[in-house]
Amino acid sequence: MGGRTAIAGCRLTEGPMKLDSDAPQKRLARERPLARARLLDRWPHLLALPPTEGAIIRRWTESGPPVVTIICSTFNQSELIGDALHGFLTQRTSFPFEIVLRDDASTDGTQQIIHDFAQRYPRIIRVVLHKENRYIQGIFSVHDRPALISGEYAALCDGDDFWVDPEKLQRQVDQLRRNPQIVLSTGGTLHFSAKDSSSSIVGEVETGVIYPDHPPRYHHTSTYVFRSKPYIDVIQRYMVPRGLYGDTVVRSLIMTHGKIAAVTGILSVYYIDGGGMWTRMDGRQQAETHVHIYATLVRVLPWRRRVKALRPLALASRTLVELRFPSSNKVAHANPKRGIPPQVRRLLQWYRKLALIARALWGWGPRTTGRGAA
């Protein structure tokens, strides 16, 4: 578990999209101090300095290699990465864990903060610092993870999120060890806005639960702890070859290996306006991403789960049509045969067919009449 700094350089090319990566962080840098103070009223232990490396290791009653690999992906999050690292280092566990920090060519000082922490915790922290941004080349952080994970379990938390429960890892690993059928342990997250200090709790459960099927509630990725082998299999078999990423993909595909569970309480905080990859996208980019994700899931999931991906695919397709051609929905209802570009007509026909299938399977979908949309 020695501290190692890997410098990986990549050729910079034009990617699928260009995002304004700096504006959200600059705004948040102004708004965050007061917002963070309000958060600390709820979790005062975050004010204390993290323990030393020696103090952390002395808690580990189990010997051997790391049981958990914590994967933290960062990009221009110098105002936030400190809280993420604090949440990792204050974990109280009986087993060894390691922290792998993967930075995608930050330019705001994030890499220097990572380097400083790696020097202070050389037996716990490993870092991968890219010289050139890989995301704009279509290479997502999740695609690097199989090479970074060494533990039996893998925990996720990006640099703009942080853990607030010091027993998080211990409780989730205990849950996974007790129940071999579980492949992913999750929990509750506080979604927090630094703009106005508004918040909402998402995914919290009152008692520990093992879901018999797809979870009926959303759980944020900052709470995820996987069994490493099935997680790596999902990445290598499905996500890398098809350019997929995101929690929707992971949740759907990991269930081909076993069940998803949740532990009680709030485990993490997610900054709604933290400037993460998803929040940087506009509505059209998000809709395009959803269409790509669900269309791929329809092709690769087992049949029983495949049909369930049709509903969100239909919704994403309709949203994308309405965003790309704002007048198409009104025109389609007023005169379904005229005034619609051919490509829009084909998309609306596709949506109508998917909606009919969804209605037949789950009683869901818009009412249709003899007059088609095209």
Image: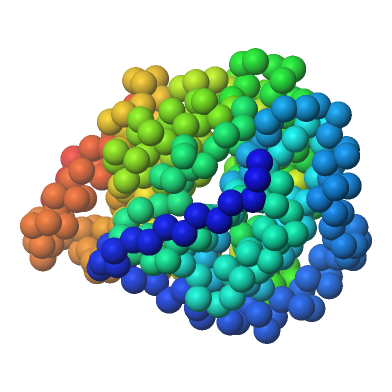
Q: Is residue 272 left or right of residue 254?
A: right
Residue 340 horizontal/vertical position (percent): 12, 62
Say above or below: 296 vs 38.
above
Above or below, 185 against 320 in this view is: above
What residue is shown at x 50% (from left), y 31% (from top)?
231
Residue at the image point whose x is 68% and y is 66% from the top: 116
Say how the picture is coloured.
rainbow
Locate residue 78 relative to residue 172 in the image: left or right: left
- Kindly tell me whether residue 303 is visible in this rendering: yes
Compared to 105, does 154 lie above or below?
above
Residue 255 visible at all: no
Percent position of residue 96, x then y: 75, 35
Q: How many numbered marks does the figure carry?
A: 0
Q: Nearer the viewer, residue 89 or 14?
A: 89
Q: Is residue 10 left or right of residue 34?
A: left
Name the residue rendered at 79%, 78% in the picture: 34
Q: Nearer the viewer, residue 112 or 263?
A: 112
**Which residue does the image show at 37% across and 39% down from the upper left?**
239
Residue 62 picture location, percent across and down: 81, 27
Res 86 quadrant in image:
bottom right
Most foreground residue, 358 or 313: 313
In percent of width and height, residue 209 lies at 72, 26
Q: Quadrant of the N terminus?
A: top right
**In the image, residue 211 above or below residue 265:** above
Give the quadrant of residue 339.
Answer: bottom left
